[in-house]
Amino acid sequence: MFGFNKNREENQSAINEQQIANADNVLQSARPEIREEDFIDTTDPNGVLLNINQNGLSTIRSVDYSTGLPIDGVFWYMEKDWEEDGMRDAIGNPDINYMNMKIEIIKQGLVRRFEMTRLRYNKLIRDCEAQIESLNTFGLTATLSSITSQIDTYKEHIQKLNDLESRFQKGAAELLTMTESYKRGFANGVAQRTQQTINSQNN
């Protein structure tokens, strides 16, 4: 009798261990894959890939406010050195029509990043919800709070994106520094190109 009970307890223990292992496998498969491109935008407004070395992006300034989440790409885009871009473009093509076209490209690039980043967050939220469903299925509710906290963070970031985009569409000055920096750089580039032309004529 005692041997029967012992075997039944051992069998139940084995079943419990197998259920936990199955749950862990489900969670591993449901966990969202966060890739570098999900939180660092490695393209310029024209979609050209930037050079990347083992230390990160070699052609942009480091982002010391990085959260490791998709919203970082939006802030990087707004904070990158647009003045340098404007100067380089003007030296190659000083046409004012080209400058105006590039400014529109910069603006549309930010709008596109708002939308892309929201889509990334929505995917992360769906992945978290899948994890929660799996945890509930197997009765493993101890870690639900941490996943719920992640969802709350993602939703806060989406709201921040919505606020930024709304202010951008209304012409908020702090969100137009990109284009002002580009214009300033373009003007400096035109001046530099003009000086180079004068110097070459005098030689």
Image: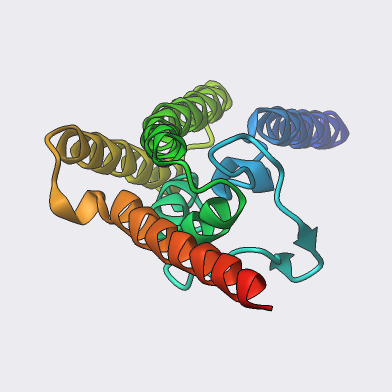
Asked if one can make out residue 76 in the rendered structure from this viewpoint, the answer is yes
Is 13 on the left or on the right of 62, as rendered? right
Rendering coords of residue 198 (x, y %): 55, 70
**In percent of the image, x 46 and y 36: which residue is there?**
98
**In percent of the image, x 24 and y 37: which residue is there?**
159
The quadrant of the picture occupied by the N terminus is top right
Q: Quadrant of residue 170?
A: top left
Is 10 on the left or on the right of 76, as rendered? right
Rendering coords of residue 109 (x, y %): 45, 34
Above or below for 8 versus 51: above
Is 110 on the left or on the right of 120, as rendered? left
Above or below for 180 versus 37: below
Total labels: the figure holds: 0
Q: Foreground residue, 76 or 124?
A: 76
Rendering coords of residue 132 (x, y %): 48, 29
**In percent of the image, x 62 and y 77: which residue is there?**
202
Rendering coords of residue 177 (x, y %): 28, 56
Q: Foreground residue, 122 or 194?
A: 194
Is 171 on the left or on the right of 116, as rendered? left
Asked if one can make out residue 84 in the rendered structure from this viewpoint, the answer is no
Q: How is the image coloured?
A: rainbow
Q: Quadrant of residue 163?
A: top left
Q: Foreground residue, 12 or 130?
A: 130
Q: Residue furthest front?
A: 202
The quadrant of the picture occupied by the C terminus is bottom right
Q: Foreground residue, 84 or 147?
A: 84
